[in-house]
Image (tube, rainbow, N blue to C red):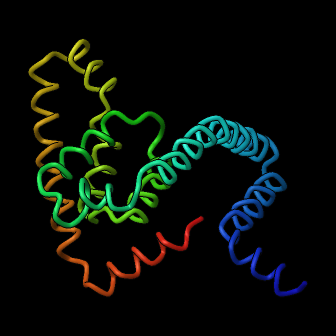
Amino acid sequence: MKDKIMKLAKRYQIFILLLVINIVVLVISPNVGRKAFQMTGSNMLEMLSVLPPIFILLGLLDVWVKRETMIKYMGDNSGMVGVLLAFFLGSAAAGPLYAAFPVAGVLLKKGSKLSNVFIMLGAWSTTKIPLILFEASALGLKFMLVRFMMDLIGIAIISYITEKSLTQKDKDVIYQKAQQTE
């Protein structure tokens, strides 16, 4: 029983630390502490409204898409098809960036190339289709195109450099951790 409690405490140590800090702030400065707890509650409600649909879609992706198919289209030998698919997945996705990480885990678990996963994460964070449309209407087509092209170049360079800077051992650890997620 003690081992289970210690394992649970270790797993949620950041959450526990933040809870303790919030309680200390509440004691020291009640107004700030109440505001911190309100913001924490609001953020948790937002996460609870976003994550369940993401997890349902991930479950369907995990069951419906065979590993061989994922390797073919986004694996090591996928080439430009994998890059474009990763970019499209990230750009068309809905939800905040923290929702992208479970998606990245499933892609890795299914055999996607690491740089394609990095591209998907980069696209998710910077090139969402609604954002691009808003920029074109609010800031002008020229601004949107310049930023979009810079994002494309930046995402590609960062993804390539990040993958190349990792050792094979680092990559193996990343894929192994992805396999362990359930």
Q: 89 or 2, which is in the foreground?
A: 89
* Horizontal and vertical percent position of residue 129: 30, 27
Rendered position, 162 above or below 62: below
- Please report the residue visible at 52 percent of the width from the left and 48 percent of the height from the top: 58
| Occupied quadrant, residue 70 | bottom left
Q: Quadrant of the C terminus?
A: bottom right
Q: Determine whether 53 is above or below 21 in the image.
A: above
Indicate the position of residue 38 as horizontal and vertical percent values.
74, 38
User: Which residue corresponds to the image point at 20% horizontal and 77% vertical from the top-left?
Assistant: 165
Query: 29 or 161, which lies in front?
Result: 161
Count of residue discs: 0
Residue shown at the point (79%, 42%) measured from the top left: 34
Outermost residue to the right: 1
63 horizontally vs 39: left or right = left
- Farthest residue in the top direction? 137
Horizontal and vertical percent position of residue 45: 70, 37
Q: Is residue 105 left or right of residue 13?
A: left
